[in-house]
């Protein structure tokens, strides 16, 4: 079993910055992809940014150029640096790990964190 813990959320003014962090723990052999999703009230959860174990990245069009995702494979952690924040970025942000290989467990699994609130408001 793998657990994810997110941190770094909070209240920030438009144009400000925040850095979200997520650490995975457990009997982890490898993580194929580490992703950030977000969900605003009344809206569907959407993929914000993704990064594979090899360092390939993908971003939602709405955040491209403002957000940067990075990971540390040795620490099983992922960060999301968010700059030039806008009110429409307000949401609960969730860490997601995809294609997890665990010691003693056949195959691969996916896991979700509990989420961290990001509010962009003046």
Image: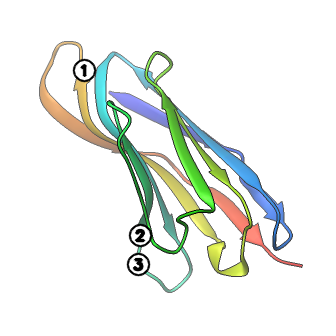
User: Is residue 99 placed above or below 94 in the rendered structure?
Assistant: above
Name the spot of residue 49 as percent of width and height, x first: 45, 56
- On screen, residue 111 versus residue 69, left or right, reads left
Q: Which residue is mark 2?
A: 46
Name the spot of residue 29 as percent of width and height, x first: 28, 16
Name the spot of residue 73 as percent of width and height, x first: 43, 22
Residue 47 falls in which quadrant of the image? bottom left
User: Is residue 14 placed above or below 114 in the rendered structure?
Assistant: below
Of the two numbered discs 3 and 2 in the rendering, the one whose residue sits closer to the viewer: 2
**Structural distance between the alpha carbons of marks 3 and 2:** 6 Å
Write the residue at 72% across / 76% down: 86
Quick one: which residue is furthest to the left in this view?
106
In the rendered structure, find residue 56 and report the number of the disc placed on it. none
Q: Do callouts 3 and 2 mark residues in contact (Cβ within 8 Å)?
A: yes
| SS type, badge 3 | loop
Where the C terminus falls, by quadrant?
bottom right
The mark that comes first in sequence, 1 or 2, is: 2
| SS type, badge 2 | strand
In the rendered structure, find residue 44 and report the number of the disc placed on it. 3
Count of picture labels: 3
| SS type, badge 1 | strand
Write the residue at 52% across / 38% down: 70
**Structural distance between the alpha carbons of marks 1 and 3:** 30 Å
In the rendered structure, find residue 102 and report the number of the disc placed on it. 1
Residue 83 falls in which quadrant of the image? bottom right
């Amino acid at each position: 079993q793998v657990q994810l813990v997110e941190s770094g959320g909070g209240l920030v003014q438009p144009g400000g910055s925040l850095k979200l962090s997520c650490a995975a723990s457990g009997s982890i052999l490898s993580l194929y992809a580490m992703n950030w999703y977000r969900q605003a009230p009344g809206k569907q959860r959407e993929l914000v940014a993704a990064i594979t174990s090899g360092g390939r990245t993908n971003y939602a069009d709405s955040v491209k150029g403002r957000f940067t995702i990075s990971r540390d494979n040795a620490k099983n952690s992922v960060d999301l640096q968010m700059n030039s924040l806008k009110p429409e970025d307000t949401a609960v942000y969730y860490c997601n790990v995809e294609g997890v290989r665990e010691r003693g467990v056949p195959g691969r699994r996916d896991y979700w964190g509990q989420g961290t609130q990001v509010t962009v408001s003046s």
